[in-house]
Amino acid sequence: MESFKDAQQERRALTLAEVNALSARDFAAHFGGVLEHSPQYAERAAQQRPFRSVEDVAEAFREAVEADEPEAQRALIRAHPDLAGKAALAGDLTAESAHEQASAGLDRLTPDEYAEFHRLNAAYHRKFDFPYVVCVRENTKETIFEGARRRLSHTPDEEQRAALHEIGRIARLRVLDLIQQGQED
Ligand code: GUN
């Protein structure tokens, strides 16, 4: 069998049995990117093994975030780059974020759309002091714009919950990418 290192280099999705058998360190290496710039949650999720399904793995990440302090949850939200923001323009995103933003065409906006994103991101930061996070792969450019306008009317508490919900959705899709489907053992 190929080594874990080989699988990592190819970013090969592992079977659930392989995931359950990884050392804590290899688990953290494989799933470290599930939550943006926040590999500590992979260490906590690893402790929930053995997992019986791919959805169980995603749930372990959600629970690890849910169990954390509100200030740490805000730090997790703040670890996300602005959509179509400076980091995206500079090519300075994680591979996961770049792929997600491209999936909704956020890397190919017209000048007017960039300007509108810039305006919405700035208004959002002013109100909530963290970036607008949405599960891009479950949305289109239009629903992402619409969500930003709608969520600007939230209270800070409502918005923190909304952002964490979206982060759970993002994490779930990243987990699905990292585990082979239809192989529950
Ligand atoms: N939704 C999916 N990926 C991202 C990201 O990298 N940043 C933000 N703000 N939202 C996202």
Image (cartoon, helix red, strand yellow):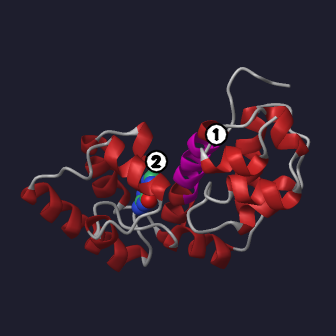
Of the residues tagged 1 and 2, which is closer to the observer? 1
Tell whether circle 1 marks a residue whose Cβ is less than 8 angstroms from ligand 1: no
Determine whether, in the image, residue 6 is placed left or right of residue 45: left
Q: Which sits earlier in the primary sequence, circle 1 or circle 2?
A: 1
- Is 45 magenta? The answer is no
Residue 24, percent from left and from top: 87, 58
Whether 50 is drawn above or below 183: the answer is: below
Please state, as top left, top right, bottom left or bottom right, where the C terminus lies in the image: top right
Q: Residue at x 64, y 68 (%)?
A: 38
- Does residue 78 appear anywhere in the picture? yes
Tell me the residue that label 1 is attached to: 12
Q: Nearer the viewer, residue 92 or 43?
A: 92
Whether ligand 1 has any atom under 8 Å from the Cβ at mark 2 is answered as yes
Q: Amino acid at mark 2?
A: Cys
Secondary structure of the residue carrying tag 2 is loop
- On whether residue 173 falls in the magenta region, the answer is yes
State the image coordinates of residue 13 (x, y, percent, origin top left). Answer: 66, 37
Which quarter of the figure is the N terminus placed in? top right
Q: Categorize mark 2 by other alpha carbons within 10 Å: few (<14), some (14-19), many (20+).
A: many
Nearer to me, 124 or 8 = 8
- Which image quadrant is residue 130 in? bottom left
Tell me the kind of residue under disc 1. Arg
Residue plotted at (76% across, 59% down): 28
Is residue 66 in view from this perspective?
no
- Which residue is denoted by mark 2 in the rendering? 135
Q: Is residue 177 above or below residue 93?
A: above
Q: Which residues are magenta?
A: 164-175
